């Protein structure tokens, strides 16, 4: 009896030691990486309708209010109103696919529902310490059927069309200043608003960096942030560009923001295409002017889409707030310009900065070098000639005139024969003159000899 009791205590001590360590120093890399790649390469995703896509994830929620799926509904329908020609992709945790109610809600606002399993980690990981939904965002890098994707977090409010963001060179992201100030190595970027090119190589790199990061996640928290934010800043440091504030703003739930207070008399327009509810600034956690705007949008969308959600504390003039941002897009018959039509005028491989071969600069430089070389040869020939430049040009002009006159003369063969006869006569007369001169010289020499 005592032996059984002590064996239970020993097992509990072993479990406690496993909870204190996420994984051991030595672990097998190939097992879990190959498993994740196998899932990524064997998917039955819906075929894309566009070359680029708006993407978000749904891997966790808060019961019983289900706040995140509410925000995803508002986000998806807002993107649809601004530009319905771009695919709206929601990557959903595989377990949620069994819930028919969740599928019906997402079907009303998103064009593509794609299911992915949670990431597989080394066997030495302790499942009690690993929170899967924090790393589910990495599955966005498996959407290789798209050239570019704009990943947008569920807790984002959209005011304008975000299609222009695809014109940026990937990777690009919004800044993050609400919880983290400017560091010595620059600002941190927001992983909930990123323009990326899906790539399985980057997918593997992210998993490897995450595995190393989880060994000591608090080590560089002040410099790199937490969770997926730290891992993405480690991977893309030095190669990512930051969107301007006009593209995406962040709000931590305060009355005054970087863009000002919209309730002020002199404030007329929110100069940003969107707002991310960062940190504790979620609409259900902390009040802000952006929370009121989000509720106005949500109430209209819930009625239109017949969604099973209810809101409290919505402003009385919610319809006016809604029309303030969507008045140009709620009209029937509006024509939307697809991104593919805009890109047709330029080479898609050029992105923002075209290469020299595509811009024609190499061809122009080659022609300039040839012209310079030929000009230098002609100048060298002119300088080396004994005649002055004017005489040189005059002689060339005379030769050209003679050639033209010969070409225009009707009896050109007879003229040539006459020239030949004249040449022969002149040649004979010259010979006679030379012989006479020689005879005179010989006679003079003889006379001189006789005198001596």
Image (cartoon, rainbow, N blue to C red):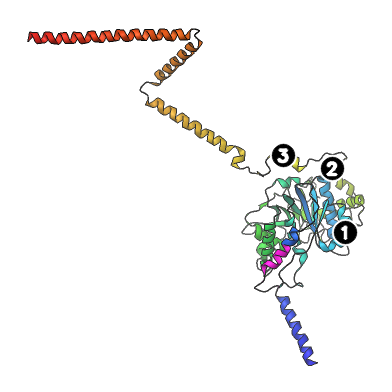
Secondary structure at badge 2 equals loop
Residue located beneath label 3 in the image: 344
Tell me if mark 2 has few (under 14), some (14-19) or many (20+) residues whose alpha carbon lies within 10 angstroms of its own.
Answer: some
Among the two numbered marks 3 and 1 on one chain, the one whose residue lies closer to the N terminus: 1
Mark 3 or 1: the one toward you: 3
In the image, residue 25 lies in the stretch drawn in magenta: yes
In the visual, does 191 lie left or right of 420? right
Which of 261 and 198 lies nearest the eye of the viewer? 198
Which of 185 and 415 lies nearest the eye of the viewer? 415
Among the two numbered marks 2 and 1 on one chain, the one whose residue lies closer to the N terminus: 1
Tell me if mark 1 has few (under 14), some (14-19) or many (20+) residues whose alpha carbon lies within 10 angstroms of its own.
Answer: few
Is residue 256 at all visible to an observer of this figure?
no
Percent position of residue 171, x then y:
68, 52
Percent position of residue 193, x then y:
74, 54
In the visual, does 23 lie left or right of 313? left
Q: Which mark is residue 102?
A: 1
**Residue ranking furthest to the left:** 452
Tell me if mark 3 has few (under 14), some (14-19) or many (20+) residues whose alpha carbon lies within 10 angstroms of its own.
Answer: few
Q: Which mark is residue 329?
A: 2
Q: Is residue 345 above or below residue 178?
A: above
Q: Quadrant of residue 8?
A: bottom right
In the image, residue 45 lies in the stretch drawn in magenta: no
Percent position of residue 321, x then y:
86, 47
Span shown in magenta: 21-36
Secondary structure at badge 1 equals helix
Q: Residue at x 72, y 41 (%)?
A: 343
Disc 3 from disc 1: Cα separation: 38 Å
Disc 3 from disc 2: Cα separation: 25 Å
Disc 2 from disc 1: Cα separation: 27 Å
Among the two numbered marks 3 and 2 on one chain, the one whose residue lies closer to the N terminus: 2
């Amino acid at each position: 009896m005592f032996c059984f009791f002590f064996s239970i205590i020993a097992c509990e001590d072993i479990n406690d030691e496993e909870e204190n360590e996420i994984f051991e120093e030595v672990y097998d890399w190939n097992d879990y990486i190959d498993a994740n790649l196998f899932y990524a390469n064997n998917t039955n995703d819906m075929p894309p309708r566009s070359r680029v896509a708006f993407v978000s994830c749904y891997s966790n929620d808060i019961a019983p209010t289900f706040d995140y799926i509410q925000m995803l509904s508002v986000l998806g329908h807002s993107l649809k109103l601004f530009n319905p020609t771009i695919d709206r992709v929601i990557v959903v945790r595989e377990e949620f696919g069994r819930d028919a109610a969740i599928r019906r809600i997402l079907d009303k606002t998103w064009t593509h529902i794609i299911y992915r399993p949670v990431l597989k980690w080394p066997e030495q990981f302790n499942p009690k310490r690993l929170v899967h939904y924090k790393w589910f965002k990495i599955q966005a890098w498996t959407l290789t059927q798209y050239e570019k994707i704009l990943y947008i977090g569920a807790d984002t409010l959209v005011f304008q069309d975000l299609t222009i963001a695809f014109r940026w060179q990937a990777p690009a992201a919004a800044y993050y200043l609400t919880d983290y100030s400017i560091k010595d190595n620059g600002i941190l970027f927001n992983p909930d608003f990123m323009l990326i090119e899906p790539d399985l190589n980057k997918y593997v790199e992210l998993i490897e960096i995450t595995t190393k990061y989880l060994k000591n996640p608090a080590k560089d928290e002040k410099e790199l942030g937490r969770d997926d934010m730290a891992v993405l800043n480690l991977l893309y440091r030095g190669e990512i560009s930051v969107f301007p504030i006009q593209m995406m703003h962040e709000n931590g739930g305060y009355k005054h923001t970087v863009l000002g207070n919209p309730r002020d008399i002199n404030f007329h327009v929110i100069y940003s295409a969107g707002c991310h509810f960062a940190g504790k600034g979620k609409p259900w956690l902390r009040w802000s002017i952006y929370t009121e705007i989000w509720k106005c949008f949500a109430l209209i969308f819930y009625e239109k889409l017949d969604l099973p959600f209810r809101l409290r504390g919505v402003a009385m003039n919610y319809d006016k707030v809604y029309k303030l941002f969507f008045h140009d897009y709620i009209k029937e018959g509006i024509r939307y310009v697809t991104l593919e039509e805009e890109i047709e005028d330029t080479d898609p491989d050029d992105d923002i900065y075209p290469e020299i071969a595509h811009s024609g600069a190499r061809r122009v430089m080659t022609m300039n070098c040839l012209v310079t070389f030929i000009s230098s040869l002609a100048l060298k020939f002119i300088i080396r000639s004994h005649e002055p430049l004017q005489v040189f040009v005059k002689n060339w002009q005379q030769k050209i005139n003679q050639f033209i006159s010969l070409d225009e003369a009707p009896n050109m063969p007879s003229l040539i024969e006459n020239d030949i006869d004249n040449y022969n006569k002149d040649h004979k007369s010259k010979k006679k003159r030379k012989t006479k001169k020689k005879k005179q010289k010989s006679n003079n020499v003889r006379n001189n000899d006789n005198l001596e």
